[in-house]
Image (tube, rainbow, N blue to C red):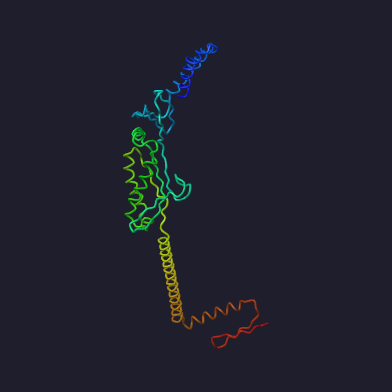
Amino acid sequence: MFLLILGLLMLVVSTVVVAKVEQLKKAVPAIRSIAILFILAGVATSCFKQIDAGQVGVKVLFGKVDEDILTSGLNFVNPVVDVKTLDTKTQNYTMSGIHDEGAQNGDDAIRVLTADGLEVTIDLTVLYRLIPGEAPRLLRETGADYTDKIVRPLTRTKIRDNAVYYDAVALYSSKRDEFQGRIFKSIEDDFKKRGLVLEQLLVRNITLPTSVKASIESKINAEQDAQKMQFVLQKEKQEAERKRVEAQGIADYQRIISTGLSDKQLQYEMIKANLELAKSPNAKVIIMGKGNTPVILDGK
C-alpha cells in the first residue's frame, strides 16, 4: 500500500508541479516511469496477502467485516481491503499473585469468598483458542482485544460465582477437582457463544487465610502424633506377645525336661560327657565313685 500511495504522489507531482517548471520538463518521463513502477509494485503487493500458520485473516472494507476468512498461505485480495490477522493457536492467560508470572504485572490473583465467609486467593491459568470460522463475528462484536474483554473478566467472575458453594478447607483439599470441573463447564459454554474454545482450566494454587492454615497444620500434626502413638502401642503389644510366647516356650521346655528324663537317661548323658572329657588332650585323672558325680584330678 505504501508503494501505491508513493507512486500516485509521484505521478501527481510530475503532472502538476514539474509541468510548470521549464527546467524539469525533461525529467517528467523518467519520473512518470518510476511512478508507474511504484504503482504497479504497490498494486501487486496489496493484492497478495500472506497469512502465517496458526492464523486467519479477516477482510475489512471501509469498516465492514467480510464473513469469508483468509487461511494460512498466500491469498489474493482487493488492494483497498484491510486484512486483520487473528491467532488461532492455543493461548494461555495466567492470573497469579507472583510478580511477573501472570499476564499482568503485580498481584493478579483472584480473591473469592467461600461458603463459610473466608477469603481465599486463587492462582489460575486458562488455555483457550479462537474458532477460525467465528473470527469475523468475534472481530465485529468484540474486536481483536478479546482476551481483555472476554477471557479475563468472564473467568474471574465465574470463579467468584462458583466459590461460594464450597467451604475454604474443602476448596483447598477434597473439593478442589470438583471446583475446577464446575468452573470449567460454566466458562466453556460462555466461551463457545463468543467464538472461543476453552481447552483447559488449571487451578495452580489456592491460598487460605493464615488462621485457617495454622489450624489445619495443627490438626495434621495432632493426627500424625496419634498415628505415631498407635504405632508405638502396636509395637509394644507385639513385643509383649513375643515375650509371652518366649516364656511359654521356656516353660514348656522345662516341663518336658523334668518329666521326660529318667535316671538311666541322665546316667547315659553323664557317660557321654566323661567320654568326651577323656578324649581331651589335657592330662587328667578321672575317678569314678559310687555317686553320680566323678572326681576329676588334673595331672599337671
- Which percent across, then down, holds residue 190? 32, 42
Give the camera-side residue of 226 and 108.
108
The C terminus, quarter of image: bottom right
Location of residue 281 (image quadrant): bottom right
Q: How many marks?
A: 0
* Residue 94 coordinates in the image, percent (x, y): 43, 46
Instruction: Tell me the residue at 37%/45% (across/down).
Output: 153
| Image vertical order of residue 265 relative to residue 139, above or below | below
Residue at the bottom extreme of this rendering: 290
For image coordinates 42% across by 40% down, the residue present is 91
Q: Residue at the spot x=46%, y=46% of the render?
A: 105
Above/below status of 247 relative to 190: below
257 horizontally vs 146: left or right: right
Above or below residue 269? Residue 193 is above
Of all residues shown, which one is farthest toward the right?
A: 300
Judged left or right of residue 262, residue 159 is left
Which quadrant of the figure contains the N terminus?
A: top left
Q: Position of residue 273 (x, y in %)?
A: 56, 79
Image point (42%, 50%), residue name: 109
* Residue 67 picture location, percent across and down: 33, 29
Q: Nearer the viewer, residue 88 or 292?
A: 88
